[in-house]
Image: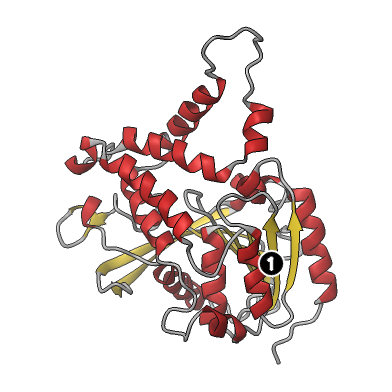
Amino acid sequence: MKKHSLVFPGIFKTEAGGELKDITLSYHTAGTFSAKSKVVWICHALTANSDPEEWWPGMAGANCIYNDEDYFLICANILGSCYGTTGPLSINPETGKPYYRNFPNITVRDMVKAHDMLRRKLGINRIHTVIGSSIGGFQALEMTLLLPDVVERMILLASGCRVTPWATAFNEAQRMAVYADPSYFADIPEGGIEGMKAARATALLSYRSYEGYNSTQAEEETNVMFADRAASYERYQGLKLANRFNAYSYVVISKAFDSHNAGRFRGGTAKALASIKAKTLIVGISNDMLFRPEEQQYMQQHISEARYVEIYSTFGHDGFLLESEQLTRHIAEFYLNHTKSHIK
């Protein structure tokens, strides 16, 4: 995929009342865009970048269901992130210094508002499919609600229509870990890194499953006294994230996660979901600890003619990243049943 960057001059007003000046949006595309293109807008999850060929192998790229021969693919890095789009480590034009903790609170709707600015700038008037998982699913749902006459199909994977107290509790536990690192308050690029390592270790417990940990992290030595394999895996994952992300973006995006409520100012979630016109596929993961299947089933019950399927993954919630064979089969079947645009 090719990486691009656009600057949008002017003031970007956030839903919570904050302001950002001259935001930059980083995004990747694959294929050649024309008025006849089948546009697939991929919404990435919490700490991913805008290159799905990198983090979604088996789903995006050559010989995958989402390839540049059949579709024009686009994925935009979310507002608040650290992969080129304006975020806490970006320079604040008003001060000449990075925002750090002064970056304004943003919501999922702010992320989607930025996506829509990009869509209009690129002249995309029809979106064949918007697809997302986890917080990417939040974005996909918001795009569908914001653009009812643009989005033709929506695919939600391991996601929901409103953040649950359970998910918010996990997010707050992660933020508490970051705040416990004094360096976070120093407003330096590496601030809060040790806290973010601990936060990532906490997050993994909701991303994976009992079966997954027990099958992959069991001690090989029969007579081991102090089990460490799973512990070392947690430390490794914390370090891995610390090498590519920053604590300020982590806090900002996790708060945005907690903002998600498709029914806010729309008369509640049931009414909002009932207004959706896009052909919809919803995929749940049976042992997903973060987004229980009943969340996806609720959406299916309130979106007209939505199709719900459930898969199993040893990896739990992270199955949306790894179960490409199962996902491809269900998405292909969904497309086969909806080969024509429903928008007239």
Q: Position of residue 143 (x, y in %)?
A: 53, 74
Horizontal arrangement in the rendering, residue 273 relative to residue 231 (left or right): right
- Give x and y (percent) for residue 210: 63, 37
How packed mark 1 is, by other alpha carbons closer than 10 Å (few <14, some 14-19, many 20 or more), is: many
Residue 246 percent coordinates (x, y) = 35, 43
Q: How many marks?
A: 1
233 up-or-down from 133: above or below: above
Indicate the amino acid at tag 1. Answer: Ile
26, above or below 210, in the image: below
Q: Name the side, left or right, on which 216 lies relative to 202.
A: right
Picture quadrant of residue 133? bottom right
**Where is 233 relative to 326, above or below?**
above
Direction from residue 259 to residue 53 in the image, left or right? right
Q: Which residue matches tag 1?
A: 282
Residue positioned 29% across, 49% down in the render: 89
- Give the residue at x 61% y 49%: 317
Q: Residue at x 58, y 85 (%)?
A: 148
Quadrant into which the C terminus falls: bottom right
Q: Along the line of sight, which residue is nearer the eye, 298 or 98?
A: 298
Q: Position of residue 275 (x, y in %)?
A: 59, 87
Q: Is residue 83 visible?
A: no
